[in-house]
Image: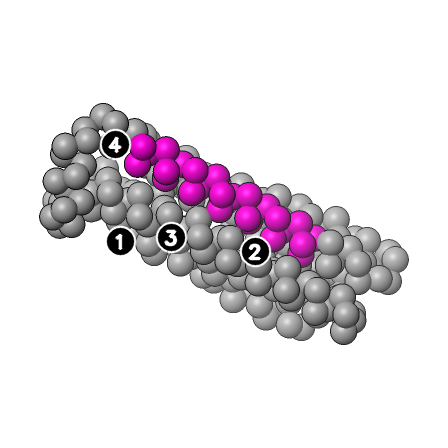
Amino acid sequence: MSESIQPKDARQRRILWIVLLLNAAIAVAFFMTGAFGDSTSLIANGLDNTSDAFVYALSLFALSRSARWKRIAATVSGSVLILFAIGILFDAGRRYLEGSEPLGPVMIVMALIAAAVNLVCVVLLRRISDPDVNVRAANIFTMNDFLANAGIIIAGTLVAWLGSNWPDLAVGVAVAVVAAWGGIEILKDAHGEHHEAVHDDPVGQKTREGTGD
C-alpha cells in the first residue's frame, strides 16, 4: 500500500527523475558512438547507463512505498547490474573472437562528455539527506560510471597509440566486473536492511509481508 508523499520524498523524486533522464540520454549517446566507433567499452557503458535508468525508475516506484518495497526494488537493482555484467562479458568475448576496430578519439570524447554528466548526477544525489537503500544504490551506480569513464579515456588513448583493440576489450571487461561488484554490494545492503527489520520488529514484519504492505 502506498504511503502519502512527504516533502522529503517529493524532493528525492525530482532529483531521481533528473538523474534518470540524464542517464537515459547518455545511454543513447553511448550506443550511437559505440556502434560508430566499434567500441565494446562504449557499448558496455551504454548498457550500464540503461540499467541505471531502469534502476532509478524502480527507485521512483518504491520511493513513496513501504521499506519492504524499497528493499525489493534494491534487490531487483542489484540483480539487473549482475545480469548486465554477464551480457558485457559475452559481448567482449564475441569481439575478441571476431575482431573489432575501435576508434580511440571517439572513445575519449564520449567518455569526457559522460564524465561531465556523471558529475552533475553526483552533485544532485548528494543533496538527498538520510538516503535510503535505493538512493545509496544510485550513488554506487554513479561512482561506478566515473570509474568506467576514466577507464575508457585510458583505453581510447592506448587504442589510438597502439592501433589495437585489446585496451577497449579490457575496459569493457573491467566495466562488467565493477558492475557485478556494485550489484553484489547493493544486494548485501538490501539483505542487511531486511535482516535488521526482521530482528527489530519480527511480528510487525510478518504482518506487513502477509498483507503485502
Q: Residue at x 31, y 32 (%)?
A: 195
- Where is residue 209 shown, x and y percent of the image? 18, 45
What residue would you read off at disc 4? 197
Depicted 59 relative to depicted 46: above or below: above
Q: Which numbered disc covers residue 61?
A: 1
Name the disc covering residue 85, or none. Answer: 2
Q: Main secondary structure of the magenta part?
A: helix
Check contact, mark 1 vs mark 2: CB within 8 A: no
Of pointers 2 and 3, the one earlier in the residue sequence: 3
Query: Label 1 amino acid?
Result: Phe
Q: CA distance from mark 4 to mark 2?
A: 30 Å
Assign a secondary structure to mark 4. Answer: helix
> Could one spot residue 52 in this view of the protein?
no
Would you say residue 181 sits in the magenta stretch?
Answer: yes
Q: Residue 94 or 108: which is nearer the viewer?
A: 94
Say whether marks 1 and 3 touch (CB < 8 Å): no
159 magenta-colored: no
Q: Are marks 4 and 1 in contact (CB under 8 Å)?
A: no
Q: Residue at x 66, y 49 (%)?
A: 174
Residue density around tag 2, few if under 14, some if 14–19, many if 20 or more, within 10 Å? many
Q: Could you say where residue 103 lies in the image, as x and y percent from the top left?
A: 75, 65
- Secondary element under disc 1, as helix, strand or loop, is helix
Sequence-wise, the earlier of marks 3 and 4 is 3
Residue 160 vs residue 210, the one in the foreground: 210
Position of 10 compared to 169: left or right? left
Q: Amino acid at mark 3?
A: Val
What is the span of residues highlighted in magenta in the rendered image? 171-195
- Residue drawn where x is 67% and y is 56% of the image: 172
Q: Is residue 207 left or right of residue 107?
A: left
Q: Which residue is disc 3 drawn over?
A: 76
Give the residue type that dot 4 points to: Ala
